[in-house]
């Protein structure tokens, strides 16, 4: 009895007779066409990718600001003291500028005047001076970050001394995103980018 899985001896293996080689890889023509398609797709996608990256940067900066404003308010209530958030370019001094693009300082403001007062020594939290709690130093990377105030101070009840509107925008964005602090101290985001 013959096994059905065995190949009969009289069948010719055509591959070995004709010496056919199986082609592996790409031809030069296929490679050029594929690379041309990839270059065209990248050329079309690059501007959209750049605007997506900028939108994400704006989104991250807005969320960071929203979080630090909420932290400032809650820490003022928790510590039962004045806390101020000011714009800063060197993370050691408030710069009294409406531009917040370079960074900010969150500090315990013992007298509530919104001015960071330090005697310049190396210890940061002495009894008779203001105490830095948190800093951020961020390069702008094409993002404009401005406000209608240079400092916002929250009292021991979490109420701001003034309202504030922070505006964050990118070069390729038609509309701005804003973080608005109302009279009760709550911060909310209006994002149009």
Image (cartoon, rainbow, N blue to C red):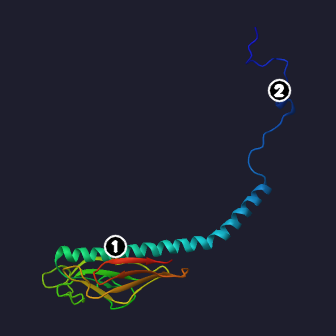
Question: Which residue is painted at 47% across and 74% down in the image?
Answer: 57
User: Few, some or many C-alpha atoms within 10 Å of disc 1 (few <14, some 14-19, many ≥20)?
Assistant: few
Identify the image quadrant of the N terminus: top right
For residue 75, above or below residue 8? below
Residue at coordinates 32% horizontally, 83% vertically from top-left?
182
- As drawn, 133 above or below 29: below
Residue 173 or 20: which is nearer the viewer? 173
The extreme left residue here reads 127
The one nearer the camera, 143 or 16, is 143
Looking at the rendered structure, which numbered label has been put on residue 13?
A: 2
Name the outermost residue toward the top.
1
Q: How crowded is mark 2: few (under 14 residues within 10 Å), some or many (20 or more)?
A: few
Q: What element carries label 2?
A: loop
* Residue 139 image point, x, y percent: 43, 79
Alpha carbon separation for disc pair 2 and 1: 74 Å
Residue 15 placed where, x, y %?
82, 31
Can you identify the residue that label 1 sits on?
Answer: 67
Residue farthest along the right direction in this orientation: 18
Left or right: 135, with 51 as reference point: left
Residue at point 29%, 84% (across, down): 183
Q: Indicate the quadrant where residue 72 lies.
A: bottom left
């Amino acid at each position: 009895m013959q096994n059905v899985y065995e190949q009969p001896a009289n069948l010719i293996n055509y591959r070995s007779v004709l010496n056919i080689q199986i082609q592996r890889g790409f031809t030069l023509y296929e490679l050029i066409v594929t690379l041309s398609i990839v270059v065209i797709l990248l050329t079309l996608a690059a501007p959209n990718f750049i605007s997506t990256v900028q939108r994400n940067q704006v989104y991250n900066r807005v969320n960071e600001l929203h979080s630090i404003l909420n932290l400032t308010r809650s820490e003022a209530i928790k510590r039962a003291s004045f806390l101020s958030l000011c714009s800063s370019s060197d993370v050691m001094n408030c710069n009294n500028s409406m531009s917040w693009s370079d960074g900010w300082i969150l500090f315990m403001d013992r007298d509530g005047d919104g001015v960071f007062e330090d005697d310049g020594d190396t210890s940061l939290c002495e009894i008779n001076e203001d105490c830095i709690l948190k800093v951020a130093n961020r390069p702008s990377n094409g993002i404009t970050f401005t406000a209608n105030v240079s400092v916002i101070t929250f009292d021991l009840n979490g109420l701001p001394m003034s309202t504030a509107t922070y505006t964050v925008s990118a070069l390729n964005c038609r509309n701005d995103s804003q973080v608005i602090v109302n009279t009760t101290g709550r911060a909310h985001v209006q994002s149009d980018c």
